[in-house]
Amino acid sequence: MRSLLCGVVAGLSVLWAPLTQAAAPCRAEAGQGVTASWYGPGHHGRPTASGEIFDRTALTAAHRCLPFGTLLTVVAVETGRSVQVRINDRGPFRAGRDIDLSEAAARQLGLTRRGVGRVRLALAGPTPICPAQRPCGGENRLAR
């Protein structure tokens, strides 16, 4: 019975791994442009990965590996407009995208019409130390 259970767990982990890593690897590097997208209407009022209820009017964002509670300054490369957001969710899970902004944050940057845009990220406060959260695999080189 024990070997059957181990086999089932191993099989599920093999099937699950490609689903959880289908998106581009986690990137969190200061000074380099990353691709931002936004989400809102379909997620409003639903729980985020942190357990917080998503509010599309709040200045929040989803990132694949930055700790929940991390404060970032996000600057639109094209316009220079900026906004400060707090990481409270996981995502985006679409290849080629690095951060998902709430509708309010995207609106302040002028990204709502296009849906995506190039941004620069910088830490806006101390990064929370949360051992249970997945680290950025050494790629977390955000500057203040």
Image (tube, rainbow, N blue to C red):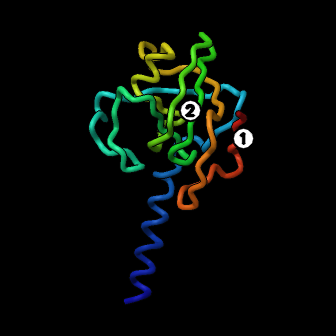
Above-or-below relation of 129 to 33 = below
Res 60 quadrant in image: top left
Q: Which residue is drawn at 51% across and 16% down?
A: 109
Q: Where is residue 139 in the image (x, y as percent from the top left)?
A: 70, 45
Q: Nearer the viewer, residue 3 or 75?
A: 75
Q: Residue at x 54, y 32 (%)?
A: 97
Residue 141: image tag: 1
**Residue indicated by mark 2:** 96
Q: What residue type is labelled 2?
A: Gly
**Which residue extends farthest top?**
79
Above-or-below relation of 31 to 134 = above
Mark sitting earlier along the chain (1/2): 2
The crowding category of the residue bearing disc 2, from other C-alpha atoms within 10 Å (few below 14, some 14 to 19, many at least 20), is few
C-alpha distance separating marks 1 and 2: 19 Å
The quarter of the image holding the N terminus is bottom left
- SS at circle 2: loop
